[in-house]
Structure formats: C-alpha cells, structure tokens
Image (cartoon, rainbow, N blue to C red):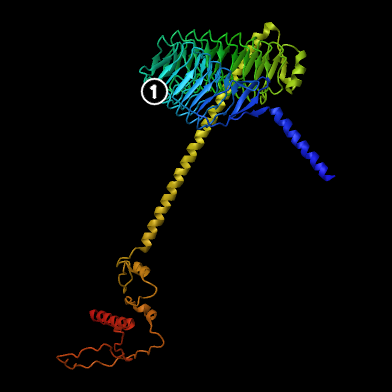
C-alpha cells in the first residue's frame, strides 16, 4: 500500500513539473534558448550556449518569429567575433551583448526600434558598428566603453540618444548625427576623440543643439546658431555668473545649468517653451530669473535648492508644476500663480520658509501631498475655486492663521493642515461649517462664515493688519532671543577667562612658595654654629643607591649617620684606644722585598687583608674616614 502511495505522489510531482515547464514555454534548439512571448506568436532569445565565431540570430524558431533579444542573453561571451541581427528583431534588451570581449563587428537591422540600456557596453574589440535605417532609440550607455570604435553614422530615423550612449569611446573621432534628432543626452559623447578635437567653447551638433560649454567667461551671450540647450550643457560650471540666451532657443534640457555655483542671472527669451528636469537645480545664488510667457511645462526639480531666489511668476500657459520644482528655496517670498494652472505636484514648494501669503486661482484643481509642507512662515491662504487638498499638503505650517475658501471645497483630506494649531477657516456657507469641522477634526469655533461680499475688503484688510502685527511680533521675539543668546555667550566667556586667570595666578604662587622653601639659606638666616648646607645634598641623597656597589666604595657618611655603616656582628669590635705610634720610625730598608701574591690576613688591630688581591671595601672606607677626620681636626 505504501509503495503504491509513493508512486502516485511521484507521478503527481513529475506531472506538476511538466505542466509548469510547459506554462513557461521555454525550449532549446541547441545554441539558443527561446521563450514564447505572451502573444503566443513570437519568441525571445533568453540565452546563448554556442561557441561559434560568427553568429546570425535566426529570424524564426519552429513556428515562432524571433522579435526580441532578452536581457543579458549573450553577456560576457568570449568567442563571438561577428554578429548579425535580422529584420525580425524589434527590440534589444538591456545588457544583451555586454562584455563580449572578442566581438569586432555588429550589424543591426533597421527593424530594431530600440537598442536597450548597456546593450553593447564594454565591448573593447568592437571596431565596426552598422546601424541601419529604422532604429529610433539608443538608450543609456548602449555603446559606452567600446574603446576600439572609430566611426559611427546614426541613421536619420534616430530620435533620441540618451546619456552616456558613447561615453568613453576613446578612439571615436568620426560621428554623423542627423538634424532630425530630438534629444542627445548628457555626456553622450564625453571622453571621445571627437569631443577633444573641438576648438569652439560652444560645442553644437545637428540642428543647433548645444551639448557642452567649455568657456571660462563670467558673462556669456550664446550665439544665434544655438537653438536648444542640451542636457548637462553647463552643469557644474564654476565661473559663469550671467547668461543671455539667444532668441532662437526653444528648449532647455535636463540639468542644463545645475550646480552652477556663481550663476546669478539668466535671461530666458520668450521663445522658450520647455524647461527640463532639474535645469537650475542647486544654483545657490541665482536670484533673478523671468520665466517666458510661452512656457508650457515646469518639470520636477527645475529650481530646487535655489536658496537666493526671492520671487517667481508662473506663466498662464503652465498647467502643472512638477515635483520639488521650487523645494527648499528658502528665500522665496512672492509666488504668483495665474489662471490656467491645474495642479501642483508633491513637494513642489516644500520648505520654502519665507512665503507669507498664497492666492490660488479658480482654475487650480489639485494640490498634492506635501506641496507646501514645512512652509513655516506662511500665515494666510486664499482659494478662489474648488481646489482639492491632499494629505499633508499644508502640514507643519506652524504660523498659518487663516484659510479662506470663497467656494466650498469638496475634496479636502482630513490631514491636509496637520500640525497647524493657530488656523481659522473662513467658508462661504454656514451649511458647510459642521461638515468641514467633522472632516478636518477641528472644533467648530475655528471655522467661521465669510461676511457679505461688500464687507470682504474691510475684513481682509483687518486680517492683513493682524498678519503684519503678528509678523512684527514674531520678528521682535526672534531678536530678543538672539540678544539673550549673545549675552549668555559673552558672560560665559568672561567667566571662563576670569577663572583661568585665577587658576594661573594660584599656580604661580604655589610654584614660588615651593622654590622659596627648597632654596638654600644665607649665612645671616642660619643659626650660629651651623655650616652652609650643600645645595646639591638633596640631589646626591636622591641619587645615592640603596646598596653600595662592591667595586666602588660608598661616599663618606656624616657623623650623625655613622651607625648606618656599623660593622657586622661577626667582626671583632675595634679597641677604643689605639696603641700609640712610636716617635721614631725605623728606617725603611733600601730595597723592599717583593710583595707576595697573597698578603697575610689582617689582624683585629686594623692591618690590611687581601682577598684575591683586593682589599675589602669596609677597611678602605674606615681608612678614608679616619684620614678625613684628621684633616678636619688639623684645619680647626
């Protein structure tokens, strides 16, 4: 029974796996691994396992048309030298042939509409690239790092060449770009020999696309041949302060002037209809810019982090303000929106700390989340139409006091004014008060009806006076806080300085008293009968070893310390009275006998004794002591 159960479970597992493989519709015909696409009629190459030097992608496999080369299908192949892509293929996915070390020639059919991101990136042996008519899009870094490539001709069908497309193709010196190209991404030709051979400071291609400015001037007026400012054309320029665009310019590309640290003034002509993403981001000192009336789009991050920008007027033809378009413009005070604006995207004016009042036109339909978040100085907003407010659209506007709705809004999120404790709402209908209070979770006392139309100006003038008074009070409070902080810092500094002086004086006095206590006294200060002390006695006493060296006799001690050098107990005591020396010494013989190698030992009366040819240290010390005592007695 158990055996049959095991067999059934095994069959079920095998069947399940088979169904799963069939659902994936992946099959292998030898060198290529294919996967059937969702339409059930076409196939995609997902892997190549062959070893051929010359590869031609098959246009058909079984009954399926090969329309796509999948991501990383041939990546890091080391054998292919020549590649041919047939007309059936319409799309080459990202990194499809990336890192093919031996690839020297690639012929791409015109039916391929898009060459994906990094498709032939880092193919160092690629010398010949044939792009046939029909190719429309070359994605980011598609051929970057092809260091052997010398010439490229882009067909007239190409519309976009994205950033870094031919980046670091160091030998590329001959490139043909059609006038029909609509976009050439930033740094697309950076690092090529063609770029290094340019002699003008305004490098343009095709129909007047300025792709890079290499000049060093602080003030520049662009030539009339420039019709479009390419992506990153002036990015990071460190010297440019003033720029005048020609009247032929119609488009400013992505990040065209980003991080220009000294740029203060830009004159945009009325012909400009599009300003790309991040075009002026990070221009910290930019304070004077006028948007042209024909402008139709403001992309995200257009003026983000322009800290010196103080005023901006959005043209009537602009329907949407992109994400982070004016975020962190901390000095921006005056923002004028005209009829025609439809939406304000998330974070568009976030952390614009100097805005005091905003008036929104009737055409505005949506203010997205966090659009005016952390605009801490905004005190009053007015809505002339039915504008929807998303969550946190005015959050953390701490000093906002008045929100005036001339028409009852129908779509306000309950957290739209999160963190605004001072806010009072003015609505045009008494019927809306309770509903609005319920939705926003505010007390009804903070929601008031607008007065009759004829009295609105008087009421709002009073509001403006209150606002100005509040602003003045707020400024005075800040001033007082700053003054108190400075005073505390000064007092603390004086206290620290005085304390340090006191500590230094005390330290000097202690050092002086210590030197006075250890200094030798003069004869007048010393009592009678005492001798002048040795100034080096302290030093000698500190340097004296605790145990005398057996090879060097110790120094003669004073009389008061004679006990320190008393004889050992086994030595016989010296007689208190020495025998008198005879008055006359016997004459020394003319010739002394030679001293024996070993002298006899000394008797108890003080004769010398030798041990191995040397006298004892103690006997030498006693002899020197006796001699010094006799000398001092004689001098007295």
With 302 as the anchor, is 371 left or right in this view? Answer: right
Residue 431 found in image quarter: top right
With 453 as the anchor, is 190 left or right in this view? Answer: left
How many numbered discs sit on the rendered protein? 1
Task: Where is residue 196? Give x, y as percent.
Answer: 38, 22
Depicted 160 relative to depicted 127: above or below: above
With 21 as the anchor, is 69 left or right in this view? Answer: left
Depicted 516 relative to depicted 428: above or below: below
Task: Where is residue 157? Give x, y as percent.
Answer: 51, 12
Residue found at the far right of this picture:
1
Locate the N terminus by quadrant.
top right
Q: Secondary structure at mark 1?
A: helix
Q: Nearer the viewer, residue 129 or 625?
A: 129
Let me know if residue 140 appears in the view: no
Residue 521 found in image quarter: bottom left
Label 1, on which residue?
Answer: 193
Residue found at the far left of this picture:
590
Residue found at the far top of this picture:
454
Task: Where is residue 80? Give x, y as percent.
Answer: 50, 29
Q: Residue at x 67, y 10 (%)?
A: 385
Q: Residue at x 63, y 16 (%)?
A: 381
Q: Nearer the viewer, residue 216 or 555?
A: 216
Q: Nearer the viewer, residue 253 or 51?
A: 51
């Amino acid at each position: 029974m158990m055996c049959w159960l095991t067999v059934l479970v095994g069959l079920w597992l095998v069947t399940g796996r088979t169904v799963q493989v069939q659902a994936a519709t992946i099959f292998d015909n030898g060198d290529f691994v294919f996967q059937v696409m969702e339409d059930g009629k076409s196939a995609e190459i997902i892997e190549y396992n062959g070893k051929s030097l010359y590869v031609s992608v098959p246009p058909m496999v079984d009954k399926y048309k090969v329309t796509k080369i999948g991501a990383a299908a041939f990546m890091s192949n080391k054998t292919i030298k020549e590649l041919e892509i047939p007309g059936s293929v319409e799309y080459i996915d990202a990194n499809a042939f990336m890192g093919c070390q031996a690839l020297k020639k690639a012929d791409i059919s015109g039916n391929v509409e898009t060459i994906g991101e990094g498709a032939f990136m880092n193919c160092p042996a690629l010398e010949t690239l044939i792009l046939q008519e029909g190719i429309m899009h070359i994605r980011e870094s598609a051929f970057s790092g092809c260091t052997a490539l010398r010439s490229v001709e882009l067909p007239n069908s190409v519309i976009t060449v994205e950033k870094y497309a031919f980046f670091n193709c160091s030998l590329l010196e001959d490139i043909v770009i059609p006038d029909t190209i609509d976009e050439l991404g930033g740094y697309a030709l950076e690092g090529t020999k063609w770029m290094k051979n340019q002699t003008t400071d305004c490098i343009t291609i095709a129909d007047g696309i300025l792709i890079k400015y290499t000049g060093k001037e602080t003030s520049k007026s662009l030539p009339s041949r420039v019709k479009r400012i390419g992506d990153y054309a002036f990015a990071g320029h460190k010297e440019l302060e003033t720029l005048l665009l020609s009247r032929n310019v119609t488009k400013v590309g992505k990040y065209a002037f980003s991080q220009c640290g000294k740029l203060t003034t830009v004159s945009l002509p009325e012909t400009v209809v599009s300003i790309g993403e991040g075009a002026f981001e990070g221009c910290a000192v930019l304070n004077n810019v006028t948007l042209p009336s024909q402008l139709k789009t403001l992309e995200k991050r257009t003026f983000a982090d322009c800290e010196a920008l103080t005023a901006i007027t959005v043209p009537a033809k602009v329907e949407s303000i992109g994400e982070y378009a004016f975020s962190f413009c901390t000095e921006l005070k005056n923002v004028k929106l005209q009829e025609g604006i439809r939406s304000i995207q998330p974070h568009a004016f976030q952390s614009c700390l100097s805005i005091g009042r905003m008036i929104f036109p009737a055409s505005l339909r949506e203010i997205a989340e966090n659009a005016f978040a952390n605009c801490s100085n905004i005190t009053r907003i007015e809505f002339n139409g039915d504008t929807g407010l998303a969550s946190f659209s005015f959050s953390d506007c701490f000093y906002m006091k008045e929100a005036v709705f001339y028409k009852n809004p129908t779509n306000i999120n309950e957290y739209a004014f999160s963190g605004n404790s001072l806010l009072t709402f003015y609505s045009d209908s008494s019927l809306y008060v309770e509903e609005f209070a319920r939705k926003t979770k505010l007390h009804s006392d903070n929601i008031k009806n607008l007065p009759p139309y004829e009295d609105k100006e008087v009421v709002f003038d009073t509001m403006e006076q209150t606002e100005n008074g509040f602003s003045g009070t707020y400024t005075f409070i800040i001033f007082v806080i700053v003054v108190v902080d400075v005073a505390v810092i000064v007092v603390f500094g004086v206290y620290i300085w005085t304390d340090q002086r006191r500590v230094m004086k005390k330290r000097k006095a202690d050092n002086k008293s210590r030197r006075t206590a250890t200094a030798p006294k003069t004869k007048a200060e010393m009592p009678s009968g005492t001798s002048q002390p040795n100034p080096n006695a302290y030093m000698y006493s500190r340097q004296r070893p605790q145990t005398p060296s057996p090879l060097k006799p110790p120094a003669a001690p004073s009389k008061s310390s004679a006990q320190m050098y008393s004889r050992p107990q086994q030595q016989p005591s010296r007689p208190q009275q020495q025998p008198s020396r005879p008055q006359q010494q016997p004459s020394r013989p003319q010739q002394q006998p030679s001293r024996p190698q070993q002298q006899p030992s000394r008797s108890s009366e003080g004769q010398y004794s030798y041990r191995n040819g040397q006298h004892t240290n103690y006997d030498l010390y006693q002899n020197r002591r006796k001699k010094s005592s006799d000398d001092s007695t004689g001098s007295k």
